[in-house]
């Protein structure tokens, strides 16, 4: 956790992600990244220079067999308020038969998360995207959209009057994976039929293959993204 906290603290301070008296909704999918972010923020608030509160929010998409009970128990153990919002997103995706269901699913999940965060009086929403996610999104935009783009560490949503922050922007996935294993985080298996077969998974596989031959590939790509796109001004959510 110390290595994760160190990288997270650098990201939070570099991009002024948290302000005094913020109430931050942590989007918890049940995966290792969001659970690690929840625990890291719960630890960080103990020694942060600013006072802030966090709550956990899970958007239940309606897939049968996904049990968030262990996540609720974890939240109770670390003193974090927890909310689950049940939706029919899985059924909507079946009816719509979209060519790109992942994009529609992501939009609906974000909308539901932001709506509940506002209802609960939150000023910011924290997502568990790590530095490999930044690189994957860059290549997704490059290969499939023909443009240079990725998501921003901090994004202001004017319609919702919310800030979306990504405290793990400097955190490596390997460190998250190791922490999740050692801490036995209650990871909830994703039962979405598209899990592991999406374009994002293709990009993950591509990056991992490149990294086998070049151990500095990820760090150089991250540096290029940070410094080459006008200090993140071209980056989009």
Image (tube, rainbow, N blue to C red):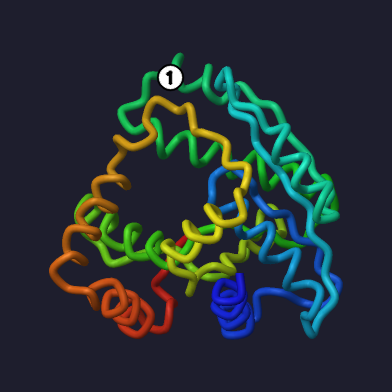
Question: Label 1 crowding class (10 Å Cα cut-off): few <14, some 14-19, many 20+?
Answer: few
Q: In this orientation, which residue lies closer to the viewer: 93 or 1?
A: 1
Looking at the image, which residue sits at the far left? 213
**Quadrant location of the N terminus?**
bottom right
Tell me if residue 39 comes above or below residue 87 in the rendering.
Answer: below
State the image coordinates of residue 12 (x, y, percent, origin top left). 62, 78
In-image side of 103 versus 85 (left or right): left
Q: Residue at x 68, y 47 (%)?
A: 114
- Residue 21, image quadrant: bottom right
Q: Residue at x 51, y 41 (%)?
A: 107
In-image side of 4 versus 228 (left or right): right
- Disc count in the image? 1
Q: Residue at x 29, y 53 (%)?
A: 204
Q: Secondary structure at mark 1?
A: helix
In-image side of 64 versus 227 (left or right): right
Q: Which residue matches tag 1?
A: 96
Q: In this orientation, which residue lies closer to the viewer: 85 or 236?
A: 85
State the image coordinates of residue 36 (x, y, percent, origin top left). 60, 57
State the image coordinates of residue 190 (x, y, percent, origin top left). 49, 33
């Amino acid at each position: 956790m110390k290595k994760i906290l160190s990288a997270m603290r650098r990201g939070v301070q570099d991009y002024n992600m948290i302000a005094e008296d913020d109430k931050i909704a942590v989007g918890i999918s049940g995966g290792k990244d969001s659970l690690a972010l929840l625990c890291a923020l719960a630890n960080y608030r103990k020694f942060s220079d600013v006072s802030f509160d966090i709550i956990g929010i899970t958007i239940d998409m309606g897939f049968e067999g996904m049990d968030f009970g262990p996540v609720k128990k974890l939240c109770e153990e670390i003193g974090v308020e927890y909310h689950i919002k049940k939706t029919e997103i899985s059924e909507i995706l079946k009816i719509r038969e979209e060519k790109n269901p992942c994009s529609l699913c992501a939009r609906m999940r974000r909308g539901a998360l932001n709506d509940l965060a506002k209802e609960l009086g939150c000023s910011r929403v924290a997502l568990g995207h790590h530095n490999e996610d930044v690189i994957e999104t860059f290549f997704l935009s490059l290969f499939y959209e023909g443009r240079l783009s990725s998501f921003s560490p901090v994004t202001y949503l004017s319609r919702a009057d919310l800030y979306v922050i990504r405290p793990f922007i400097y955190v490596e996935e390997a460190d998250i994976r190791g922490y999740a294993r050692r801490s036995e985080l209650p990871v909830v298996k994703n039962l979405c039929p598209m899990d592991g077969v999406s374009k994002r998974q293709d990009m993950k596989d591509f990056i991992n293959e490149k990294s086998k031959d070049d151990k500095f590939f990820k760090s150089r790509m991250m540096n290029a993204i940070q410094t080459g796109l006008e200090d993140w001004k071209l980056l989009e959510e």
